[in-house]
């Protein structure tokens, strides 16, 4: 692969591919047999708030891999140790990296952007809650996803913002914590980049949903399709002490 063939995705075009993937929220009890959209949305908002209020810090290992077109081999890989603190946001330590220099440069730019988005006062603008999204319950009958009964909601952003998306949200029918999301960016960062198609899966860790896998795909002018896959492993979570 020739380096000059990758020049198109330089700042800030390429980093839009993953800016939607990096946010999550927690869950609280409250499942009711009588479901309606307002009560479900209220419970989802409460679960988001519960996670923000109770997780004071965590660390996790994140592996990013970039693929062009249908290539089975990644163009670049980076593994980082992520540390989140509620009062500061995220910091990153690079554990390893390899592949295209230009792609690695963009991955570092993505990490810088994520660091900014995780800061207090900024992270609230990208949470999946009713402040940032209009939510519509697709059905009051749960569907099975990854062995869990889930409620399914349609999400539409309240702002035309590239950090928000239009798509589908699955939440656990018992505690309203996020299980999966899929969608497309509300807006592209550039006319050279198509809106990203995103997906993200979560697992319960210490009583709260934490991302385990994520993927974003975009088409970039003069480059074609680019996909970034992210895997999250080894969570260690610190919770607010009980009063």
Image (cartoon, rainbow, N blue to C red):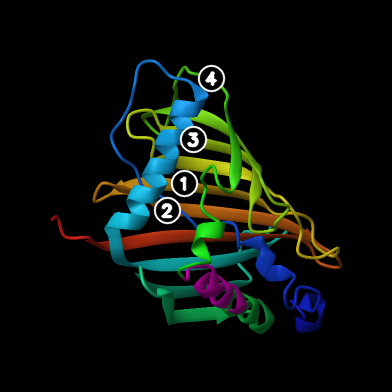
Q: What residue is disc 1 on?
A: 201
Residue 197 image position (x, y, % from top left):
67, 49
Provide residue 143's location: percent of width, then percent of height. 46, 23
Q: How many marks?
A: 4
Q: CA distance from mark 1 to mark 3?
A: 10 Å
- Sort mark 4 into few (<14), some (14-19) or many (20+) by Cα contacts within 10 Å: few
Q: Which image quadrant for residue 27? A: top left
Find the magenta span and give its range: 109-119
The answer to whether residue 70 is seen in the rendering is no
Quadrant for residue 52, please give it: bottom left
The image's mark for residue 139 is 4
Tell me the residue that label 3 is attached to: 170
Q: Residue at x 68, y 55 (%)?
A: 217
Comes first in the chain, label 1 or label 3: 3
Q: Residue at x 44, y 27 (%)?
A: 39
Classify mark 1: residues with Cα within 10 Å, few (<14), some (14-19) or many (20+). Answer: many
Q: Are marks 3 and 2 in contact (CB under 8 Å)?
A: no
């Amino acid at each position: 692969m020739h380096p000059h063939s990758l020049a198109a995705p330089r700042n800030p075009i390429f980093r839009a591919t993953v800016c939607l993937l990096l946010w999550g929220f927690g869950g609280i009890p409250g499942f009711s047999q009588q479901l309606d959209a307002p009560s479900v949305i209220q419970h989802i908002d409460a679960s988001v708030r519960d996670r923000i209020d109770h997780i004071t810090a965590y660390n996790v290992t994140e592996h990013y891999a970039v693929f062009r077109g249908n290539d089975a081999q990644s163009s670049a890989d980076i593994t980082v140790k992520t540390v989140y603190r509620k009062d500061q946001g995220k910091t990153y330590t690079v554990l390893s990296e390899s592949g295209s220099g230009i792609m690695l440069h963009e991955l570092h730019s993505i990490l810088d952007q994520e660091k900014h988005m995780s800061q207090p006062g900024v992270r609230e603008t990208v949470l999946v809650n009713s402040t940032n999204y209009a939510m519509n319950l697709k059905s009051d009958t749960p569907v099975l996803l990854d062995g869990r009964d889930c409620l399914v909601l349609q999400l539409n952003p309240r702002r035309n913002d590239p950090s928000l998306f239009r798509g589908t949200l699955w939440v656990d029918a018992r505690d309203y914590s996020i299980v999966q999301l899929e969608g497309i960016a509300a807006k592209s960062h550039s006319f050279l980049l198509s809106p990203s198609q995103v997906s993200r899966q979560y697992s319960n860790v210490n009583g709260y949903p934490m991302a385990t896998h994520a993927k974003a795909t975009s088409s970039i002018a003069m480059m074609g399709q680019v996909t970034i896959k992210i895997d999250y492993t080894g969570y260690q979570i610190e919770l607010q002490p009980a009063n």
